[in-house]
Image (spheres, grey):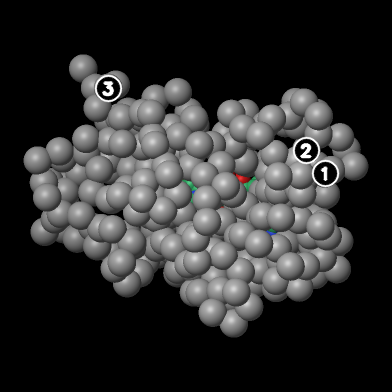
Amino acid sequence: MDDPVLLTGAGGRVGQAILRHSGDRFEWRLLDREPLSSEKLPAGVSKDDVYAVDVTDEAAVEEAMEGVYAVIHLAGDPRPEAPWDSVLRNNIDGTHTVLQAAVDAGVEKFAFASSNHAVGAYETDERTPEMYRPDDDFKLDGEELPRPSNLYGVSKASGEVLGRYYHDHAGISVVNVRIGNLTEGHPPIDYERGQAMWLSYRDCAHLFERCVLADYDYEIVYGISDNDRKYYSIDRARDVLGYEPTDNSAEFEG
Ligand SMILES: NC(=O)C1=CN([C@@H]2O[C@H](COP(=O)(O)OP(=O)(O)OC[C@H]3O[C@@H](n4cnc5c(N)ncnc54)[C@H](O)[C@@H]3O)[C@@H](O)[C@H]2O)C=CC1
Ligand SMILES: O=C1O[C@H](COP(=O)(O)O)[C@@H](O)[C@H](O)[C@H]1O
């Protein structure tokens, strides 16, 4: 596929995980409100393919969207403790602006970085910490309603609903990836929740690559590696996207 893939929030942790492992897979167009240093750019991506843009800037986003085949939308405030004014502007208004521009430009697919915090309130005192352990059978599969654990999680659930609206009314393919805990090199240490939802860099890149290449209508999938501790099912990601994770947080436990 020759048409570009627009990666918003390209300079961040998730964006760099994708570019480090899939930098040669697509014709990239990179967007971030912060300037991207040359070491953050994969080979073959020139400064002409980089847009220093705020995702709430409609005109600038429309310009970056011209001719794009698919969008991987990562840009936003990633802090679970982020205040309402920030998640309202960066995560909700920003996602609306990017989705509207994508539809207006005839973009085929939209992959949204949702979060475990969109469903964090399922992790009740009664269920934890046992639910983070391999022998517990509690599972979430993406069919469940959001239960945000904070206002950041509300903004992520809002992004999922924005995608539902634009799929239903404009036909764009949408996949919401409820990312767990992206940690480079190994799972979080001494943190059972993080180990249950660990996503390795290479599995992250592979999963978003599948979001560009697979065909789907509207989906919600979990973005985690194949962890023994997982309480998120990755069956939907396997069945619809062809996701085949390599890593498992259990392999790093003594
Ligand atoms: N890192 C993780 O474990 C997880 C991340 N996510 C989501 O994935 C996405 C990326 O997260 P990270 O890479 O960890 O965050 P990050 O903070 O490392 O990267 C986010 C990037 O987006 C840019 N950005 C923020 N607001 C922007 C705006 N208004 N306009 C343009 N660019 C903007 C920042 O400059 C930054 O380079 C976020 O939406 C986050 O909510 C979800 C679950 C887990
Ligand atoms: O959405 C996100 O979730 C991860 C994991 O949550 P945590 O509460 O276990 O840290 C978080 O690390 C990341 O910053 C955030 O964007």
Q: Considering only vertical position in the picture, is 74 above or below 170?
A: above
Q: Which is nearer the eye, 251 or 210?
A: 210
Q: How many marks?
A: 3
Q: Amino acid at mark 3?
A: Glu
At a point 66% along the width and 68% down the height, the residue shown is 99
- Which residue is identified by label 1? 50
What SS does tag 2 mark? loop
What SS does tag 1 mark? strand
Q: Would residue 139 be found to the left or right of residue 99 on screen?
A: left
Query: From this viewpoint, is residue 172 visible?
Result: yes
Q: Are marks 3 and 1 in contact (CB under 8 Å)?
A: no
Marks 2 and 3 sit apart, C-alpha to C-alpha, by: 34 Å
Q: Considering only vertical position in the picture, is 250 above or below 91?
A: above
Q: Considering only vertical position in the picture, is 207 above or below 173?
A: above
Number of residues whose C-alpha sits closer than 10 Å to that of mark 3, classed few (under 14), some (14–19) or many (20 or more): few
Q: Which is nearer the eye, 38 or 233?
A: 233
The extreme right residue here reads: 48
From the top left corner, tell me how far across and down residue 23 is, in percent. Answer: 67, 31
For marks 2 and 1 on the same chain, the one whose residue lies earlier in the sequence: 2
Q: Are marks 2 and 1 in contact (CB under 8 Å)?
A: yes
What SS does tag 3 mark? helix
At a point 76% along the width and 73% down the height, the residue shown is 104
